[in-house]
Amino acid sequence: MIRYDDHAGEGDRERLLALMEAEPVALVSDAGTPLISDPGYRLVRTARERGIAVTSLPGPNAAIVGMTLSGLANDRFLFAGFLPNKARARESVLQELSGVPATLIFYETAPRLEASLQAIAATLPGREVAVARELTKKFEECRTGTPEDIIAHYAAHPPKGEIVLMIAPPSDDPVGEVDVDAMLLAELANSKASQAAAKVAKATGMDRKELYARALELK
């Protein structure tokens, strides 16, 4: 047995990763589900980056299992059910939740996955996403990357089964001009310049008047 907790360092993680490349390794906890408010997510994230297969034993529901497999930050997460089916309502929900400092978790169906990923790309540009599907079954998988990357993958390999769709928290870095333009353009497709500026201001904390002026330029 090897202890892995908040006090574990880079060397401890590398030791475990070396073991994982040679034999099965089980991460267990005596205090609830591992990887929920647990430093083990860093181990999972690095293992996935190196191509090491990771699976999770069934938990209380698919959202928790998906969260443990994703490698996304797990100290805070918000489960928000299914995204709306209509495009405008879907984008409105994503905009509403864009500033929440937590990983967002949704349930999704295979036929609607691409539309939801397109909405995330337009409304929350730059965010990492994870798609976990067929959890606990033979063809279980969890893919992470940009929405565009995952759309391209599933265009060639159409998904099946029930899906847990997760979005990484907003970055602490300031929003760049390109990202702001993308957010404004996404809102301008269905809103007036003033409304678009108000929504982006709420999501980013930027000055509403400056965003309104930029929206008028883009429009």
Image: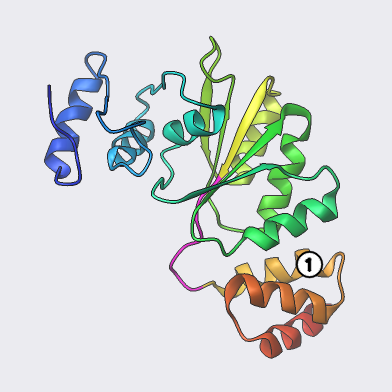
Does the stretch in magenta take in 172? yes
For residue 45, what is the image quadrant?
Answer: top left
For mark 1, what is the residue?
A: 187
Q: Give neighbour class at mark 1: few <14, some 14-19, many 20+ (Cα, 10 Å).
A: many
Q: Please state, as top left, top right, bottom left or bottom right, where the C terminus lies in the image.
A: bottom right
For residue 43, what is the image quadrant?
Answer: top left
Quick check: 178 above or below 3? below
Please tell me which residue is depicted at 77% across the width and 80% down the height of the picture: 215
The mark tally for this picture is: 1
Name the element at disc 1: helix
Span highlighted in magenta in the image: 167-174
Q: Please state, as top left, top right, bottom left or bottom right, where the N terminus lies in the image.
A: top left
Give residue 92's position: percent from left, percent from top.
76, 59
Give residue 117's position: percent from left, percent from top.
68, 44
Q: Nearer the viewer, residue 71 or 17?
A: 71
| Color theme of the render | rainbow
Give residue 111's position: percent from left, percent from top.
78, 29
Please tell me which residue is depicted at 72% across the width and 72% down the height of the picture: 199
Give residue 59's position: percent from left, percent from top.
46, 24
Q: Is residue 146 left or right of residue 76?
A: right
Q: Is residue 102 left or right of residue 24?
A: right
Quick check: 89 above or below 79? below
Q: Is residue 27 left or right of residue 37?
A: left
